[in-house]
Amino acid sequence: GLVGSEMCIRDRSPCSSAKVEFSRINNCDSNHNTVVYAGGFSTITAENNWWGSNNNPSGYFYGNIDAEPWLVFSSETFPCAINITETSTVIAGVYSNSDGLDLRGTTCIPDETLISFSISKDGRTLSSQNVASVSGVSEITFSPESSGNYNICSLLDGEAVNTEVKVFGDDLS
């Protein structure tokens, strides 16, 4: 898919059309740029694209453009409650769209896209790392150092999503 911040499709004939899907179109700024321009009678179908944000991308367009649904960034933990001696898998990525359709197995953003993970507890950051995506998803294994609630923040193109892991049991010492 397209990786960048701008595309323009202009009329070359009375019935121009284009389709862009499963692309990473980031660095979008609706206050300063029209990211997708469909001039004249052009029609652009731009469904299922990652726009660098989970928000509706309609502010990035000029002309006849259909971009609904768009791709969203999310994260999950499996399991979300563990004993202090166990681990939890944290998955973050672009694997569903704004209509809630699960698109796992589809490469929604280019492989090797870095997703950042940051683990914190009681407002203190404990660790962070960048993990390259495969089929739109990155994952880490979380191993707790003590009982309590941990927040795992995942970051892609400035969009942050959070998930929590609850850890039970006596602290290791």
Image (spheres, rainbow, N blue to C red):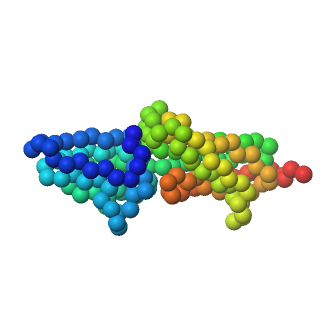
In the picture shown, does residue 32 fall above or below 44? Answer: below
**Looking at the image, which residue sits at the far top?**
105
Q: Identify the residue shown where x is 78% and y is 54%.
A: 147
Q: Identify the residue shown where x is 62% and y is 51%.
A: 117
Image quarter of the N terminus: top left
* Rendered location of residue 91, percent (x, y): 58, 43
Tell me: 23 left or right of 81: left
In the picture shown, does residue 124 fall above or below 16? Answer: below
Tell me: 80 left or right of 100: right
Between residue 166 and residue 130, name the one nearer to us. 130
Q: Identify the residue shown where x is 44% and y is 39%.
A: 108
Between residue 57 and residue 78, name the one nearer to us. 57
* Rendered location of residue 75, percent (x, y): 55, 48
Quarter-of-image position of residue 119: bottom right
Tell me: 105 left or right of 12: right
**Looking at the image, which residue sits at the far front?**
12
* Rendered location of residue 44, percent (x, y): 23, 46
* Rendered location of residue 73, percent (x, y): 48, 49
**Looking at the image, which residue sits at the far left?**
14
In this view of the protein, can residue 100 be seen by the observer? Answer: no
In the picture shown, does residue 77 fall above or below 158? Answer: above
In this view of the protein, can residue 147 be seen by the observer? Answer: yes
Quarter-of-image position of residue 58: bottom left
Between residue 42 and residue 8, name the one nearer to us. 8
In this rendering, the count of numbered labels is 0
Q: Identify the residue shown where x is 45% and y is 41%.
A: 109
